[in-house]
Image (cartoon, helix red, strand yellow):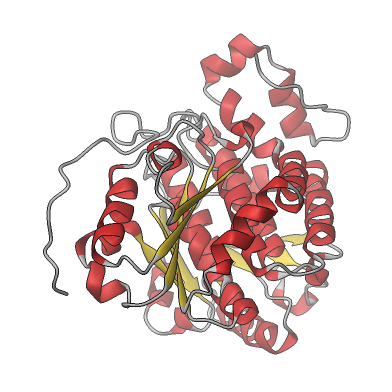
Amino acid sequence: MIAEVSPVSLSREVSTLLACSEAAQRHAGYADTLREILQQPQTWMDTSALLAESAAAVLAQALATQPEYLVLTGSGSSVHVGECLAAVLQTQLRIPCRAIPAGDVLTHLHGMLSPGRGLVVSIARSGDSPESVAVIDSILAELPACTHLVVTCNANGRLATRYRDEPRVRVLLLDPRTNDRSLVMTSSFTNLLLAGGALGQPATYASQVASASALAQRVFDCHADALAQASRSDFSAAVYLASGPGIGAARESALKMLEMSGGAVATMAETFLGLRHGPMSALSRPSLIVAFLSAQASVRDYECDLLRELTRKRLGLARVIVGEAIPADVVGAGDLVIDLPGLDALGDTPRHMLDVVVGQLLAFFRCLHLGQKPDTPSAGVLTRVVEDFAIRSTGAGP
């Protein structure tokens, strides 16, 4: 059965989709994806409660080893979780933190990880991707001083079950509802991001999550119709802009559009300052620009300068700008402003969860506009879990 979602205050577009019968939703191919997007505000609150209770001991034990460095690893969307977290955790924990794709760790272990007492955080929805287990096995064998924290949504996955008797590996399990059934990661992504952010243990984290949940509901209630309209614009490319750790949210949002459009929309994620150095040439084609603005005033000044430059050069078909108190002079006549009061008071991690929610909705509506099925886009090309492939020995050298 499809979980109940009250349409009382939801936007017209979302309410119309929810009003269809379960059979109709299944036939149209959006039942799982829409439910998983809309359940995020509640699942964030549930994950926050978990982090304050039973999961707190797991996180404390992982950090009790006093790691000299921290590596966040995963594949696909999961590594984008790490990209959102690395700089934030480095500031909070005062140790070097990096996000490294699991495939790079698998093929170039000694070039990616340092000897010594590292903490490797493996992030995964299913925990069944071929490289996920291979990475931990390799590190256990070749870098025995490292300890591991697995953060996963699947209690039955290989990452959650394989290391029960290995004292160097600890597992943090999230609520089963976050183990998205859809091919694309939505609620799994934001809840994994929320859980990973708890490693920094900010005192105000729980209250920030509550505020983020309320703002996500505001996006569903007040902005979904406009996002649906923007998704139907005549663009062939979408460019996502962010700064600092926000680049992880930009890359995840770009991936969602690429996956759910079946590759019909070319996507790119770039920093605001990086766009000038070559990537701006991509905007010569009809492009939707999605700008995730920073809460930091000095950073936002750079971002707004870039948006004004794009206006002067008449680049981009239209823009979706996400932030709080967005300056009027960076908004064009055809642009969509997602102004969320209270957004700037959130910490980086909850803020980027909101950015990703906007990216998810844009991709979801674009998928429907193209006549595709959000639950199973790119049929015959992508699978929910990457198919098994041969794991090969790469030797002990760099």
Instruction: Describe residue 260's horizontal placement relative to residue 130 as left or right.
Output: right
Above or below, 165 against 322 in this view is above
Q: Is residue 333 visible?
A: no
Instruction: Describe residue 163's horizontal placement relative to residue 341 as left or right.
Output: left
Q: Can residue 156 be seen in this view?
A: yes
Q: How many labels does the image show?
A: 0
Q: In which quarter of the image is the N terminus?
A: top right
Residue at 65% from the left image edge and 30% from the top image edge: 35
* x then y, percent, for residue 138: 25, 57
* x then y, percent, for residue 124: 46, 47
* x then y, percent, for residue 384: 40, 34
Q: Which is nearer the eye, 372 or 146?
A: 146
Instruction: Describe residue 150's horizontal placement relative to residue 242 as left or right.
Output: left
Residue at 55% from the left image edge and 74% from the top image edge: 314
Q: Which is nearer the eye, 55 or 37?
A: 55
* x then y, percent, for residue 154: 50, 35
Q: In which quarter of the image is the C terminus?
A: bottom left
Q: Which quadrant of the view contains residue 366?
A: top right
Instruction: Describe residue 370's horizontal placement relative to residue 345 as left or right.
Output: left
